[in-house]
Structure formats: structure tokens, C-alpha cells
Image (cartoon, rainbow, N blue to C red):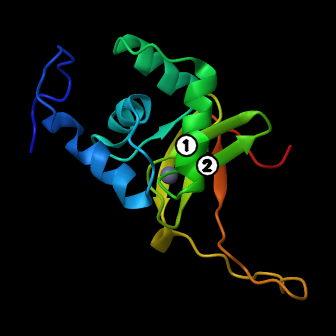
Amino acid sequence: MTGIATDMTATTDSRPYAKALERLKTVGLRPTRQRLALAKLLFDGDDRHVSAEQLHAEAVAADMRVSLATVYNTLHQFTSVGLLREVVVESGRAYFDTNTGNHHHFYHVDEGKLVDIDQSRLSVATLPEPPEGTSVDRVDVIIRLRNGQGSVQS
Ligand SMILES: [Zn+2]
């Protein structure tokens, strides 16, 4: 549809924000300037996994004046209303996924990179009975990869 997405030159045209605005409206979040700008970075284009630090760096590169704390807060707000899904790969390391459908992940440990695995490509053969009074919400699998040809057993 658009071939100009990489051009960051300022424009008075508000059209580029239409998609971001629509997303915020749908979930009832007030479209503040910062939310709009961050939503545009997140949702214009293909699905992606970003850390707060990555998004902050992109925002700064796009001449946004925004603190890392604000980026964190906004990402968590977006997550709580279902615009994003948080994928915690290890303690203190989380990615925010624009693909909120059910799917699994490869995690490239050496590069710190997540890649989607379509739900249809992986099945979990046996699930334990959920504890009394609970039900399974979803199952998400992270397959952790290392570069090179390691072996599982030592
Ligand atoms: Zn994903």
C-alpha cells in the first residue's frame, strides 16, 4: 500500500497516523501525542517483537522526546488493553509482540531475537489437568535456540 514508510521527513499530513489512531480508538485509549507516535512505530508495518529499549531508541531516532519510563508505561498500557502481548523470555527481559493471536516462538538466545511459530506447526501432546477451579487460558511455547550445532545431552 505505501512505499514511503521509511521516509521520516516531517509532514503536516495526518494520514500516516490514521492506522495508529484507529487502533487506539478501538480499545478506548485516549490518543495522546505520545501514544499515537508510539503506536505508529509499533503498528505501521509487519508484526514485530520489540523491547522497551528498542522502541525507545526508535522514538529518539524519530525525534520524539520521550523517556524510557514513558515508553515502558505505554507498552504496558497497550498490553493491558490487548493491543500487544508481552513475551517474557527470561527474568528482566521482555518483548512486546504486535501479533496478539495465539502462536509460539523461537527465541534466538545469542541474538536476543524472537521469531513467530504458527500455532498449527506445534502441538503439545499432553497437558496436565489444570488445578481445581481453573482452566487453561492459553499455552505458549518458547523454543530456545543457540547458534551452532550443539547437542541436547552432554
Ligand atoms: Zn510473536
Q: Residue at x 89, y 83 (%)?
A: 131
Relative side of 87 to 59, left or right: right
Q: Position of residue 99 (x, y in %)?
A: 44, 55
Label 1 element class: strand
Relative side of 16 to 46, left or right: left
Q: Quadrant of residue 141?
A: bottom right
- Residue 111 visible in the shown view: no
Q: Residue at x 41, y 32 (%)?
A: 38
Q: Are the residues flagged by discs 2 and 1 in contact, CB closer than 8 Å?
A: yes
Q: Residues within 10 Å of mark 1 (few under 14, many from 20)?
A: many
What label sits on residue 96 in the rendered view? Answer: 1
The answer for how far apart the CA atoms under marks 2 and 1 are is: 5 Å
In this orientation, which residue lies closer to the viewer: 11 or 125?
11
Above or below, 106 relative to 50: below
- Work out which quarter of the rendered image holds the N terminus and state it: top left
Q: Name which residue type carries label 1.
A: Phe
- Residue 127 visible in the shown view: yes
In this orientation, which residue lies closer to the viewer: 142 or 98?
98
Q: State yes or no: Cβ of the residue under disc 1 lies below 8 Å from any atom of ligand 1.
A: no
Q: Position of residue 57 (x, y in %)?
A: 48, 16
What label sits on residue 86 in the rendered view? Answer: 2
- Work out which quarter of the rendered image holds the C terminus and state it: top right
Q: Position of residue 37 (x, y in %)?
A: 36, 30
